[in-house]
């Protein structure tokens, strides 16, 4: 009888120890995840037009990373970073790019699978002026650049279509400023949620080249298990230095990485 009690006590003690170790391991893993910085790749490669604000945007992205606790990697050579060995290390990838970036077919598949797997991709301004020869990219970002009737010296008014969303909740209902505004071709409104758009009632719509019927400026979508956000603003350096714009970028990163 005593032997049975001793054996039972031993088994119970072992179970307690194992449970304690498992709980401790879970705690350590959770703390490790919380302590690890969010890792962001910011791509400013220009195979077409090169924006004057790129260098300023790189500076600001690094500053935002320092202020908000995420690690920023800058590159103007996407082909060196978007490899099987590297891409798994990033939580966020942001494109402020133009033209046909020199990615292989394998790298293009890697990028799309990375997003679908649960990661966050953000396109800024000319990200829609990128990869015209890659249909899957256009489908993912939901459109391509189709001219900018409103140049960087044109005053425009934007309306915030959803002020309840965390990305745009800090913005007023309407804003007027100078900015280069894109119109998009092959934009499908059914695939995305628009957060901000051009206010056509308060903007000059008689300019040469205006042909689109919708003018989304900030929109998002699910992509597999991941998230995609496009922000058409950011041509002018003074947009980048604006507090409201920087807050929108940070809010988007927090939203996209949940």
Image: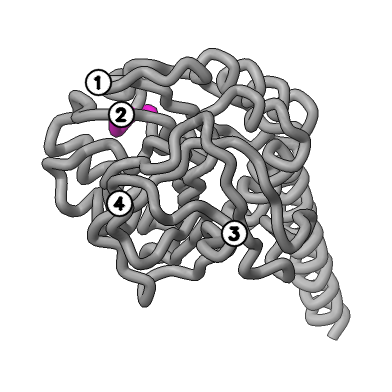
**Whether residue 220 is situated above or below residue 111 in the rendered picture:** below
Labels 2 and 3: the sequence-earlier one: 2
Q: Is residue 202 magenta?
A: no
Residue at position x 43%, y 69% in the image: 192
Labels 4 and 1: the sequence-earlier one: 1
The residue carrying mark 2 is 98
Q: Label 4 vs label 1: CA separation? A: 24 Å
Residue 139 position, x and y percent, is 25, 58
Read off the magenta span.
82-86
**Whether residue 205 is situated above or below residue 41 in the rendered picture:** below
Taking the view exactly as shown, the residue that stands out farthest to the front is: 206
Q: Nearer the viewer, residue 96 or 34?
A: 96
The residue carrying mark 1 is 47
Q: Are marks 4 and 3 in contact (CB under 8 Å)?
A: no
The label nearer to you, 4 versus 3, is: 3
Task: Specify few, some or many for label 3: CA neighbours under 10 Å numbering under 14, 14-19, or 20 or more.
Answer: some
The residue carrying mark 4 is 113
**Whether residue 53 is situated above or below residue 156 in the rendered picture:** above
Q: Quadrant of the C terminus?
A: bottom right
Q: Label 4 vs label 2: CA separation? A: 22 Å
Whether residue 71 sits left or right of residue 173 in the image: it is left
Residue 124 position, x and y percent, is 47, 39
The residue carrying mark 3 is 202
Determine the secondary structure under disc 3.
loop
């Amino acid at each position: 009888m005593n032997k049975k009690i001793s054996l039972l006590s031993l088994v119970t003690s072992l179970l307690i120890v194992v449970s304690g170790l498992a709980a401790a391991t879970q705690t350590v893993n959770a703390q490790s995840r919380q302590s690890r910085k969010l890792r962001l790749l910011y791509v400013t490669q220009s195979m077409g037009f090169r924006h004057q604000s790129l260098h300023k945007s790189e500076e600001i992205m690094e500053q935002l990373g320092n202020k908000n606790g995420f690690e920023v990697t800058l590159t103007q050579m996407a082909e060196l970073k978007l490899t099987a060995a590297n891409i798994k290390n990033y939580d966020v990838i942001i494109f402020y790019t133009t033209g046909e970036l020199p990615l292989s077919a394998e790298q293009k598949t890697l990028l799309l699978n990375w997003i679908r797997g649960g990661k966050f991709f953000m396109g800024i301004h000319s990200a829609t002026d990128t990869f015209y020869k890659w249909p899957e990219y256009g489908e993912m970002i939901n459109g391509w650049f189709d001219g900018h009737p409103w140049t960087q010296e044109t005053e425009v008014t934007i309306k915030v279509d959803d002020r309840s969303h965390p990305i745009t909740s800090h913005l007023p209902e309407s804003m007027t400023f100078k900015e280069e505004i894109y119109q998009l071709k092959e934009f499908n409104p059914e695939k995305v949620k628009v957060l901000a758009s051009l206010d056509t009632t308060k903007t000059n719509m008689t300019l040469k080249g205006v042909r689109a019927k919708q003018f989304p400026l900030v929109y998002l979508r699910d992509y597999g298990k991941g998230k995609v956000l496009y922000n058409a603003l950011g041509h002018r350096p003074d947009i980048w230095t604006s507090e409201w714009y920087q807050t929108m970028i940070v809010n988007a990163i927090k939203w996209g990485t949940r």
